[in-house]
Amino acid sequence: MKSIYYLIFLSFFINLNCFAQSADYRQSIDSLIAVTSPRPFNGVILITQKGKIVYQKAIGYSDFEKRVPLALSDNFRIMSNSKQITAVLILREVEKGTIDLNSPIRKYLPHLTQTWADTVTVHQLLNFSGGVVEINKPLAFKPGTDFLYGVAPYTLLGNILTRVTGKTYVDAANGLFKELKMNHTFCYESAADQPNVVNGYRLEKNSFIKQTPPLTQNQWVDFVPAGGIVSNAIDLNTWDTHLHGGKILKPETYKLMTRYDITARHDAFGSLKIGYGYGLRINDQTAVTHIGHAGKGLGFVSIKVYYPKNEVDLIVLENIYHEDSNLHYYFENKLREIVINSSLTK
């Protein structure tokens, strides 16, 4: 009889412990996004583990003027998270043998007048070690010796993709989204064509100021491979689980994407200098390895982080940023740390 009571007690204790563990990150996140100082949270959060949703939340407005509430399915500009998609498109061509990572970009873009096209490689564009500042300017440093983040390297990668595939970047990217059934993800070309994008805002002196793209139509064409893709949390979770689950790239190609020979610091990933692969930041310097990328601009802030050991994926999309640039990734940094220190990654 005592053994029966012991089993009942043990079962109760296990269930209570599991509940406490599941509640730890939920309560922490709920408390975090309830604060309004130093700035309010306005966006969506989606966390999955092994493909199952363990946390989801939409807070704030997609349109402050009309007071339209945000929904998890709303579309955001993902800005520099677009680079990861461009990197994958390039790597799929590497798998086909149409692109060689170690070839100078002159091989694919013979029309470039800059002499550095003979020395900067595709690999160095992908991991920002080529020193490319702008296409019509000299290099900032000898290729392979430093890290310089920017738009131009991924504009060039988009041009390379077009040259070797015979498709526009938009057609190539949209084809991949269709393949993965990311039905709400697309390349942003013009506001008239894409009405289902939430507004982006800048929070300045307690006022929300709507941000509009400053680029011309032609400038958008070059910007899209670096920061012009629109998506939502659900589709981005599909992307992460497929990419890190081996369903987009071959295992050996994925290893190329997630290796690094250059390091850099980023506001959304703490104070450490961590690895930069191909459109991915790799943090293997802490107790819990995590892989991801961030993006911001035009009133939008985003972060995608995958924790491979426990197959946990964190997606955060916001459509405001603060006038103080030090606060742009305030919530993204704290959410990333909450997951690291939670039962999800233990």
Image: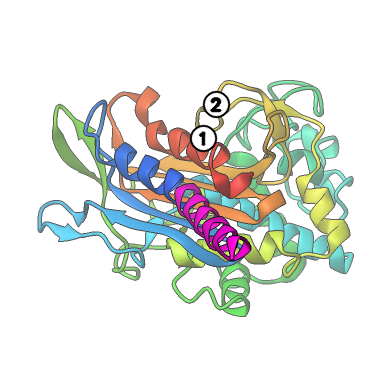
Residue pictured at 52% horizontal, 53% vertical: 13
- Residue 337's disc is 1
In front here: 39 or 30?
30
Q: Residue 38 at x, y = what percent?
A: 26, 26
331 versus 78 height, above or below = above
Position of the N terminus by quadrant: bottom right
Q: Residue 72 at x, y = what percent?
A: 35, 63
In front here: 316 or 52?
52
- Residue 146's disc is none
Element under disc 1 = helix
Horizontal side, residue 158 vs residue 250: left or right? left
In front here: 20 or 262?
20
Q: Residue 155 at x, y = what percent?
A: 61, 48
Asked if the stretch drawn in magenta spans residue 20, the answer is: yes
Q: Looking at the rendering, which quadrant does residue 225 occupy?
A: bottom right
121 versus 132 height, above or below = below
Colour approach in the figure: rainbow
Position of the C terminus by quadrant: top right
Element under disc 2 = loop
- Measure how far apart labels 2 and 1 are at the Cα level: 9 Å
Q: Mark 2 points at which residue?
A: 270
Cβ–Cβ below 8 Å for labels 2 and 1? yes
Residue pictured at 71% horizontal, 71% vertical: 166
**Range of magenta residues:** 1-21
Q: Residue 44 at x, y = what percent?
A: 35, 54
Give the residue type that dot 1 points to.
Glu
198 versus 309 height, above or below = below
Residue pictured at 79% horizontal, 46% vertical: 122
